[in-house]
Image: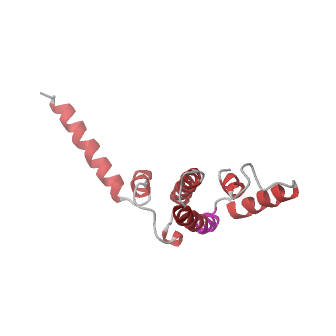
Amino acid sequence: MARPEEKAQAMLNKWVKMREEDDPTSTLARRAASRQKRPFLASQCEHLADAEHFRRQIIREISEGIKKIQNPGMGEHAIRDLNDSINKLIREKWHWNRRIKELGGKDYNKEERKAMLLAEQEGGTGPDGGEDVQLAAGLG
């Protein structure tokens, strides 16, 4: 059985954690909030770190979609549906990029435009010949 000092310390730790979760400015509360579902509107996000997290999440989803769409055994209907969802995610990423700039972060939209212009000047469309230029620029 635990000693009284250990029990008291455990109770203190539980109390401190509960208090930090209730404080919306604490990093613990923001981490718990970032594990939640991505807000429908980017403007509902109030913290730069959370916005960056959701942007990275969208980029991962776009990458997964691009991997799936390159499967040669996929039917035309499935490819069209997947392409529509990828385009929707790219639009959503643009909104998160804008929100990150509003919160004082980097201007990812500007960086992505520069990368696309640079790729066009070099004569290619990107490493895989498609939307990957925008994706590659978003990873930076």
Q: Is residue 13 above or below residue 49?
A: above
Where in the figure is residue 39, as x and y percent of width and height?
45, 67
Colour scheme in the image? Answer: secondary structure
Residue at 83%, 59% (x, y): give it.
120
Question: Which quadrant of the figure contains the N terminus?
Answer: top left
Which contiguous range is marked in magenta?
91-104
Q: Is residue 77 left or right of residue 127?
A: left
Where in the figure is residue 88, as x and y percent of width and height?
56, 68
In the rendered image, which quarter is residue 51 located in? bottom right
Which SS does the magenta portion mostly show? Answer: helix
Where in the figure is residue 14, as x and y percent of width and height?
26, 45
Is residue 107 among what the camera can see?
no
Is residue 132 among what the camera can see?
yes
**Residue 25 lies in the magenta-colored region:** no
**Residue 94 lies in the magenta-colored region:** yes
The furthest residue to the left: 1
